[in-house]
Amino acid sequence: MNIVVCVKQTFDTEAKIVFDSQGRIDPNGVNLIVNPYDEFALEEGIRLKEKFGGTVTAVSMGGARAQEALRTALAMGADKALLVSDPALNDADEWVSTQALAQAISKIPHDIILAGRVAIDDGSSQVCVRLAEELHLPSVSTVLKFSVEGNKVTAVREIDGGTETLEVELPVVLTAQKGINGNEPRYPSVAGIMKAKKKELKTMTLADLGLSALEPKMKISKYDLPAPRQAGKKIPGEPAAAAQELVRLLHEEAKVL
Amino acid sequence: MPKGIWIFVEQRDGQIRKSSFELLSEGRKLADQIGEPLVGVILGQGVETLVKAVAAQGADKVILVENEQLKNYSTGAYTSALNQVIRKGEPQAFLMGNSATGRDLAPRLAQRLGVGLASDCTGIEHDPEKFLVFKRPIYAGKAFAYTGSTARPVLATIRPNTFAIAAADESRQAEVEKETVSVDPADLRAIIKEVALATSKRPELVEADIIVSGGRGMKGPENFTILEQLADVIGAAVGASRAAVDSGWREQKFQVGQTGKTVSPTLYIACGISGAIQHLAGMGSSKFIVAINKDPEANIFNVASYGIVGDLFEVVPLLTEEFKKLVSA
């Protein structure tokens, strides 16, 4: 089975957001990680390979530092990695990212394409569904669990207030909800890290992919930070009196009840 | 010449979602500012009765697309249908709720149309030069990006609870345009076999006006009963922190925070939650935050509108009793 996992490098969830002199988000000094949802997708990709045989290719887009995320993927058990990297992609929107990734993945054999349901940085939750469309593949998003039998995939996805079970034939794109199939992403072992150093990690530019610079559809005009919240009142007194006072404040002052 | 602000009226089993009414209300204001019509788009089968409610909420026109393939939501059939009506009617903007359906449908539709999409927005401003500027929380709400598109139509999904629902005007009439579409078999490759809806009477977490949430301080799954009792008195949803979910006390779908759901209710009651940066990112835009925690130094108190330093096992049941009195008064 040919498995492709899309991996994005993101800021650590602990990261505080600061801007550089041009008002852009400053990545300097920020610890970078594999997007946590993509780790679940990687784990599933590696388990599929362990069950059915085949190849897991991890694909990412980003600057040179994104190689670290791909090395992590290789250390977890991916066989090969491909980084799409080009200065012309710095202002890529989801459409541009999709064109580049679709071009890259179309050249890799793929029965199943996995990714996290969202990246925790821009939170846009678009590229992998767009990718499915661009590659003319069906997709199931926010998958809680799935199984593969022959050519048939049965997937349970999260919907508002419940779940939906779908059947679809390979090839397919699946986006992983946290905890997909009840699995925990593995930590790379020391042996895995050593092996990863010898595995193929290719970098391709837009020109390598046969693409020229692409004009994004969406443009960000500025960034800002939420207004800091002010600490409010701590309500003193015995629990019974405090509970009574809290309800009074919610009703009379906040007027929420 | 592109025409109008279009709203996707999301319905399930003939019920219009709350977020669609929120969008129609805000869309009405935007349409007036721009001087263009507001159009509601309903997809389904046997859903003509919904036209009245969409008109009452401000739509000048309703595009009704009925087809057996559209009775229940599926990615492919809905993409196929919307692609056809949008190419024909050429709206300026097409707005959807950021529901499970919106998140699944919008990127595929945007890609098929070859246009931009602003997802999970918490604000829309009209700008004479930039047309519509969308405010998007990024890094789970630790920052905002303001984004817009020069191409038309621009697509956007809007986070539930972002806009207030205006009073419906039952005397309003809307022009109804019935459209027929054909669904390409290639769009029907993922087949829905079963839909299982939870039987809970509590509101959906991301749509709820009030959320009662528990963290590590809950000490075990059985103790969430006291939060559920509180929630049911005031019609709240029950959420959880990552610590509670990772301990296996609550299901992942109830997690609030950077690797869970981002919520913005009117009132968020945090019980036994310390207030890690990842959790605050997921609920920091709540209008009022109440914190109940034993530790007076807990970070959650730095963002709480009201706090009680105390044992939640003592405070929460007392609070439930007080709310009962208020509700029955």
Image (cartoon, helix red, strand yellow):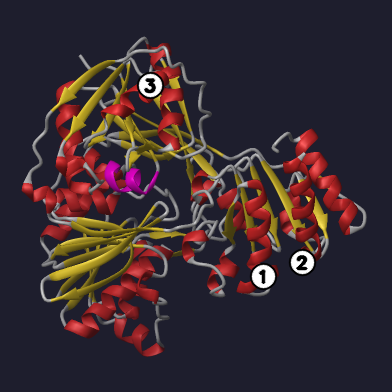
Q: Residues within 10 Å of mark 1 (few under 14, many from 20)?
A: some
Indicate left or right for B218 with A151 as reference. Answer: right
The spot of residue B113 in percent (x, y) is: 18, 35
* Disc 1 from disc 3: Cα separation: 51 Å
Quadrant position of residue B196: bottom left
Mark 3, Cα crowd under 10 Å, few <14 / some 14-19 / many 20+, is: few
Three-letter amino acid code of the residue under disc 1? Asn
At 7% from the left and 48% from the top, the residue drawn is B185
Helix, strand, or loop for circle 1?
helix
Q: Badge 2 is on which residue?
A: B313
Q: In the figure, residue A75 lies in which quadrant?
A: bottom left
Q: Badges 2 and 1: C-beta atoms under 8 Å apart?
A: yes
Q: Which residue is mark 3?
A: B130
Residue sitting at 51 percent across and 30 percent down? B163
| Residue B79 at least partly seen | yes
Residue that sits furthest to the top in the current view: B35
Please give the residue where the numbered disc 1 appears in the rendered image: B223
Q: Are marks 3 and 2 on the same chain?
A: yes
Label 3 resides on the chain identified as B
Stretch in magenta: B99-106
Q: Quadrant of the C terminus of chain B?
A: top right
Question: In the drawing, does residue A180 fall left or right of residue A211?
Answer: right
The furthest residue to the front: B328
